[in-house]
Image: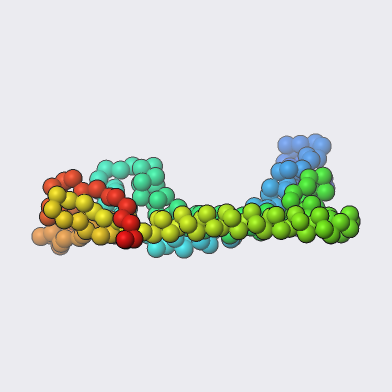
């Protein structure tokens, strides 16, 4: 409701732009696709931020430090270190937001003026104005099945990603649960003579500089 007061023709946004002399006639900020998108983002943004924040908070800062020590720029650090570790949280947030956003009908009604129909709006219309309960129930079941299939596919992907890895060398293999374990293996701190900790890559016996990852099956 607050966005209706802000975006309407005599709302805060248009009055502010008029006071600055940027516009003379009010802009059509309400009852369009942009206002619907703004309402959905405003509603579900916290559900996306929390999983991403919790994932970023658990990232070992040593990984970022050693990336800079290996002369990586900020873009490379984000693309090769931060994003792979934060990707699970982003996927969890997307899964949490997807289901309620798919069934949302209040934002299209209030901010879209009923001009745009989402799936949630269509289901709500069948149970209220159209009085076609069988069709509304069928739509609800279809949406529920679709959401469950997406969650099932995501759970299978998580199981595949959670399988242990095998670090192969010439004579032996080291089992690693996650790529973060590989980072812990490479990023062992050793105190220098001047009291400053420096990062060094420890030598893994048998690897001879040719260590690599490969998925290991449960058997």
Residue 18 picture location, percent across and down: 77, 41
Residue 42 horizontal side relative to residue 84, left or right: right
Residue 133 picture location, percent across and down: 84, 59
At a point 73% along the width and 47% down the height, the residue shown is 35
Residue 69 horizontal side relative to residue 150, left or right: left
Answer above or below: position of 205 versus 209: below
Answer above or below: position of 81 versus 144: above
Residue 140 picture location, percent across and down: 73, 58
Location of the N terminus by quadrant is bottom right
At a point 80% along the width and 36% down the height, the residue shown is 24
At a point 69% along the width and 47% down the height, the residue shown is 37
Figure quadrant of residue 176: bottom left
Answer above or below: position of 28 versus 60: above
Residue 176 visible within the image: yes
Residue 211 picture location, percent across and down: 21, 48
Q: Nearer the viewer, residue 129 or 107?
A: 129
């Amino acid at each position: 409701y607050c966005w209706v007061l802000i975006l309407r023709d005599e709302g805060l946004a248009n009055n502010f732009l008029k006071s600055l002399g940027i516009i003379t006639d009010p802009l059509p900020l309400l009852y369009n696709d942009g206002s619907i998108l703004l309402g959905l983002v405003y509603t579900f943004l916290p559900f996306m931020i929390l999983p991403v924040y919790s994932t970023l908070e658990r990232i070992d800062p040593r990984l970022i430090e050693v990336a800079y020590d290996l002369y990586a720029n900020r873009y490379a650090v984000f693309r090769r270190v931060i994003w792979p570790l934060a990707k699970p949280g982003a996927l969890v947030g997307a899964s949490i937001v997807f289901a309620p956003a798919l069934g949302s009908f209040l934002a299209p009604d209030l901010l879209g003026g009923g001009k745009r129909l989402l799936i949630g709006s269509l289901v709500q219309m069948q149970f209220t104005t159209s009085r076609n309960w069988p069709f509304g129930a069928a739509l609800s079941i279809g949406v529920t099945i679709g959401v469950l299939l997406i969650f099932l596919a995501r759970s299978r992907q998580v199981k595949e990603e959670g399988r242990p890895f095998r670090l192969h060398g010439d004579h032996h293999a080291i089992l690693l649960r996650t790529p973060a374990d590989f980072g812990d293996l490479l990023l062992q701190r050793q105190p220098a003579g001047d009291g400053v900790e420096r990062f060094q890559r420890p030598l893994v016996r048998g690897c001879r500089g040719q260590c690599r990852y490969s998925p290991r099956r449960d058997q």
